[in-house]
Amino acid sequence: MEEVEGLAECHRSDMEHQLERLLIHLLKYQYQPEERPRRGRSWRVSIVSARHEFSKVIRRNPSLQAYPADCLAHAYRYARRQAARQTGLPLRAFPPDPEWSLTELLNEAGWPEEPTPESTS
C-alpha cells in the first residue's frame, strides 16, 4: 500500500511541476512580448512540451484528474514569482490570480495575447 501511495505522490508532484513550468512559460510569453521575436519558437516548443507532459500524466493516471484544479492556485503563485525573477519584471506586472482555466491551459491551439494597457496598470 505504501508503494502505491508513493507512486501516486510521485505522479502528483510530476503533474504540479509540469503545470508550474507551463504557467511560467505562458506568463513570460504573454508579459514579455519584446522577447517573442528572439525566443518565440523556443517558448512555443516549451509550452507545447509542458502541455504534452501534463496531459500524459493525466491520461496515464485518470484517478488524478481532479488534482490539477486543486493545485492550480498554488502552482500559479509559484509560477508568478518565478516569471518575475526570470524576466526582471516587478511581481505586480503579473496578475495575482490565474487568467486561464485548466481547459485553456491545456488547449494546444491556445496562445496568450499581449495584455491590454489597462490590465498592466
Image: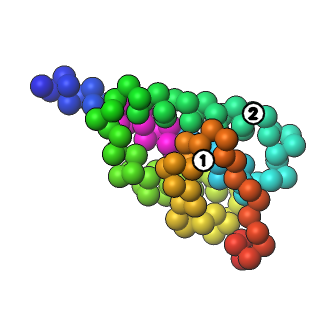
Q: Secondary structure at mark 1?
A: helix
Q: Quadrant of residue 66?
A: top left
Magenta span: chief secondary structure: helix
Q: Which residues are magenta?
A: 11-20
Residue position marked by numbered label 1 in the rendering: 24
Q: Does 11 sit above or below residue 86? A: above
Colour mapping used in the image? rainbow
User: In 3D space, how far apart are the residues under numbered discs 2 and 1 (Cα atoms)?
Assistant: 13 Å
Query: Badge 2, how many Cα within 10 Å: few under 14, some, many 20+?
Result: few
At a point 72% along the width and 37% down the height, the residue shown is 44
Residue position marked by numbered label 2 in the rendering: 42
**Amino acid type for the residue under numbered disc 1:** Ile
Where is residue 87 shown, x and y percent of the image?
Answer: 71, 52
Where is residue 110 shown, x and y percent of the image?
Answer: 66, 46
Where is residue 98 shown, x and y percent of the image?
Answer: 54, 60
**Residue most extreme to the left:** 1
Q: In terms of depth relative to the viewer, which is nearer, 36 or 59? A: 59
At a point 51% along the width and 29% down the height, the residue shown is 53
Magenta highlight on residue 12: yes
Query: Badge 1, how many Cα within 10 Å: few under 14, some, many 20+?
Result: many
Q: In terms of depth relative to the viewer, which is nearer, 84 or 19? A: 19
**Amino acid type for the residue under numbered disc 2:** Ser
Of callouts 2 and 1, the N-terminal one:
1
Q: Quadrant of residue 95?
A: bottom right
